[in-house]
Image (spheres, rainbow, N blue to C red):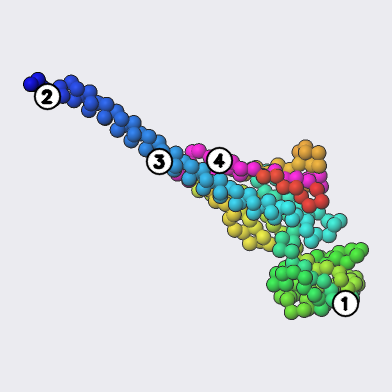
């Protein structure tokens, strides 16, 4: 009968096995760390881009309404710089119409509310436009009950069907915040609220109908917006998003 010899692993073999296992474990741990870092970075990028996208969408939507409700022979764009834009617009589509002819000098009228009657609030500015001309007035009291009252009498007769629209003044501007960061503020008729906080930068570029930089406010047909935001957990790195808005009648 043949004898089978059993022998254990040598010290060298054990050391080699231990080294191989250690290298494999270290590689696996490094992979897990890198995977975790990648996941965190992707979350950071997504959060930063979402903040920029929300602000861009909000700003673009209102800029696209620039001049809505403003008499056609008057400018809706009031100021345009690299870090600030001011404009007029009926951003709520708040519209009413005279139910009957309105006499010159009249202050109180019966109206039909077409949309958003709750936006006809005391002190708000309205444009009143007939077939041939328009006037600016301020509301003497809240509307919404089938009547409307203004502070000063009409300068002329406005026929039934003439429109009354609530026109607001809007301002988007970049303001310094903590450190080297900025807040994008939205101001409506004097009341300011931040739309985005902690931005790295914002740039506004104004283009004419040919796509060149506009020489004057009246030439502006498009606005190119670019926002840059830092990554929340890695603020030295940033992400930028851009949007281009075509203005009404532009």
Q: Quadrant of residue 204?
A: top right
Tell me which numbered mark, 2 or 3, is placed earlier along the sequence. Answer: 2
Tell me which numbered mark, 1 or 3, is placed earlier along the sequence. Answer: 3
**Mark seen at residue 239:** 4
- Residue under pointer 2: 6
User: Dot 1 lies on which element?
Assistant: loop
- Tell me the CA gap for discs 1 and 2: 112 Å
- Tell me the CA gap for discs 2 and 3: 46 Å
Foreground: disc 1 or disc 2 = 2
Q: Is residue 207 left or right of residue 180?
A: right
The answer to whether 28 is drawn above or below residue 79 in the figure is: above
In the image, farthest residue toward the front: 1
Q: Are marks 4 and 1 in contact (CB under 8 Å)?
A: no
Q: Quadrant of residue 195?
A: bottom right
Over which residues does the magenta segment extend? 218-242
- Residue under pointer 1: 100
Q: Magenta residues: mostly which secondary structure?
A: strand
Can the viewer see residue 199 in this picture?
no
Q: Quadrant of residue 106?
A: bottom right
Tell me which numbered mark, 2 or 4, is placed earlier along the sequence. Answer: 2
Residue 132, horizontal then vertical, whole percent: 92, 63
């Amino acid at each position: 009968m043949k004898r089978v010899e059993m022998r254990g692993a040598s010290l060298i073999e054990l050391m080699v096995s231990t080294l191989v296992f250690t290298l494999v474990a270290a590689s696996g741990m490094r992979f897990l760390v890198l995977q975790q870092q990648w996941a965190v970075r992707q979350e950071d990028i997504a959060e930063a881009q979402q903040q920029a996208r929300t602000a861009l969408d909000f700003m673009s939507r209102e800029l696209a309404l620039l001049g809505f409700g403003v008499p056609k022979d008057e400018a809706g764009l009031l100021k345009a710089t690299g870090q600030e834009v001011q404009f007029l617009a009926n951003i709520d589509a708040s519209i009413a119409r005279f139910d009957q002819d309105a006499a010159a000098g009249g202050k109180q009228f019966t109206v039909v509310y077409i949309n958003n009657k709750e936006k006809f609030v005391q002190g708000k500015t309205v444009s009143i436009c007939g077939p041939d001309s328009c006037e600016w007035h301020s509301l003497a009291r809240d509307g919404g009950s089938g009547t409307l009252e203004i502070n000063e009498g009409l300068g002329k007769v406005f026929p039934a069907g003439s429109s009354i629209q609530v026109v607001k003044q809007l301002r988007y501007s970049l303001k310094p915040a903590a450190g080297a960061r900025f807040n994008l503020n939205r101001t409506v008729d004097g009341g300011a609220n931040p739309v985005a906080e902690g931005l790295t930068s914002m740039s506004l570029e104004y283009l004419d109908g040919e796509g060149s930089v506009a020489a004057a406010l009246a030439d502006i047909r498009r606005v190119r917006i670019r926002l840059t935001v830092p990554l929340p957990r890695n603020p030295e790195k940033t992400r930028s998003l851009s949007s281009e808005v075509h203005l009404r009648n532009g």
